[in-house]
Amino acid sequence: MSTETLPRWDLAHVYPALDSRELAEDLSAFLSTVQEIEQHLTENATQPVRAGGPAVLSRALDRSIDLFNRALMLSGTLEIYVDSIVATNSFDTAAARRLSELEIEQVRFRQAVTRFKAWVRSLGDSLAAALEQPGPAHAHAFFLRETAEQGAFLMSQPEEMLAAELSLSGANAWSKMQRTLTSQLTVEFTLHGALQKFPMPALINLRTHPEEPVRRRAYEAEIAEWEKLREPLAASLNGVKGSAVTLNRRRGRTDCLHAPIDQGRIDRATLMALLAAMQGSLPIFQKYFIAKARRMGKERLAWWDLFAPGGRTGSAYGWKETRKFILENFGTFSPELRAYAERAFNANWIDAEPRAGKRGGAYCVGVPRVKESRILCNFDGTLEQVSTVAHELGHGFHNECAWRAGKTELQQTTPMTLAETASIMCESIVSHAVLARVTDPQEELAVLENALINDSQVIVDIYSRYLFEKEVMERRERSELSADDLCDIMDRAQAAAYGDALEGRSRHRYMWTWKPHYYITDLGFYNFPYAFGLLFGTGLYAIYQKRGSAFVPDYQALLSSTGEATAADLAGRFGIDIRARAFWDDSIEIIRARIDRYCEL
């Protein structure tokens, strides 16, 4: 990668500063809106609203919808702004304090949401008639029906109120400790003969280094650091998962998968079909791993070889080259996608520079008040990171489609299963573009390698993460888990997923320490949605290849409505049955063809 300066995102358009008048005004407006919601809910609880008939109930629901959309817009903007400062500089104590203050203020809102769910659930058959009336409630019928259904899984109101308050010093505090410890970690490492201090995300990025000794030393240095932090991170994971276990049991969930399935807006049949296809694909991926090992003169891969580049790309990607390449190829898909990405690049919506205090990985968030997205990544000039930037821009375009369609905050609440749709599509656009332009077999091999590294992570490694989290949740019901327990579970999960293609002694037993998904307090099993997204997006891209530009309007309409229907209903628009394993197997066959070509080369 060149020595060009990588961008940091600009948040000034959201609020001028932490102590700005604009932020204070929005916080005041948020608190006032929460108070209005509380008063409205109290009135509905004490007055026989249902007795007035569908029209009266509809007006009460209309008022609720308007208030909740306003509160979500304000709270989402406030939290994203402050958290974006913390995410890129966890040493900023003023921002961390402000984030903590916001979290305390949001407890009242969460409690109001719980009261609202209970009220909607209590409406029973009256709800259906009220939703026939024109107005905001009718426009949010899917949300209200889902709210009524999920209201069955609530504790008593006092218990839910207490759970919301205790979360700040319980699960949320454990999650925050994990983020702080991992984001502030720096490691001394010798590269090119010079001793340097690497932020942990930058050290992890060395897994893509072309020289095996560098990759191996980086892996060993990483493991050594996790060894030092294993006890506090094990405590963090026990705290987060222990809270989830307790709340699932008290809320009447049948098992640890019940809530994630509902949050994904899928059913158990869909998840089982997806998991069966993933498990069935493992020998296909193991064929790829063995072929890669043989290219390296080995019988099987070590962990530090999984991300090793293959073939020859000619040069690393600079930021300017990445920008140009993404814009050109997004433009072949649709002018709207290119225009969105160009706006994101030009307006400094992307924070790409790895540095101490910055979170690892990559993500995209939508800022509702200004209808803009912000993207975090840790760019290192590899083709993998080019794909990552395209992936996150896809998330941003997903937000853009909903905003352009005039969707409210409640209508944009997208399940994680569908949240990866646009990101996978954008990755596919870029990877196919790279493959289309190569003529040298070594360059084709390099491009295929990058694609298969991603595919194998999303299917094979995600499958191991699913196995890991399932066992952790089940065992956490009986007792706390030691750091050794967690390492053992992770080791066995990776063995089940990677099989004999991966050297057992070098598996990453500490993957649980730094993957943030395990520490999300209100969202369990943030793993299978990635596999869902990859295979669903791959299937959609195959449809796009057949239909061409005629596909794009339907696709953008899908993105704008992912918060207003189940995954099965939305997939049905394209003739896809996600409950049948055949669809998932067909998508895997597309990846199998890439593996076969890789082996031919």
Image: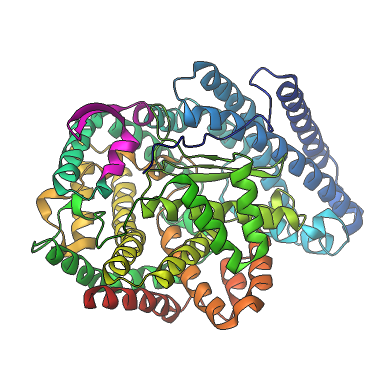
Residue depicted at x 69% and y 67% = 557
Find residue 449 and report its image quarter.
Answer: bottom left
Q: Is residue 379 magenta?
A: no
Q: Can residue 578 be seen in the rendering of this structure? A: no
Highlighted range, magenta: 181-206
> Residue 167 versus residue 139: which sits nearer the camera?
139
| Image side of residue 190 versus residue 523, left or right | left
Where, quadrant-wise, is the N terminus in this rendering? top left
Residue depicted at x 88% and y 50% = 59
> Residue 176 versus residue 195: which sits nearer the camera?
195
Give the colouring mode of the picture.
rainbow
> Residue 397 versus residue 572: which sits nearer the camera?
397
Q: Can residue 167 be seen in the rendering of this structure? A: yes
Residue depicted at x 21% and y 62% = 498
| Image side of residue 566 versus residue 582, left or right | right
Q: How many marks?
A: 0
Whether 571 is drawn above or below 35: the answer is below
> Residue 343 versus residue 290: which sits nearer the camera?
343
Where, quadrant-wise, is the C terminus in this rendering? bottom left
Q: Position of residue 272 (x, y in %)?
A: 40, 69
Residue depicted at x 49% and y 55% = 391
Q: Position of residue 283 (x, y in %)?
A: 22, 73
Q: Position of residue 61 (x, y in %)?
A: 81, 50
Whether 372 is drawn above or below 97: the answer is below
Q: Is residue 195 magenta?
A: yes
Whether 527 is drawn above or below 565: the answer is above
Find residue 300 and report its image quarter.
Answer: bottom left
| Image side of residue 484 versus residue 320, left or right | left
Q: Position of residue 297 (x, y in %)?
A: 8, 62
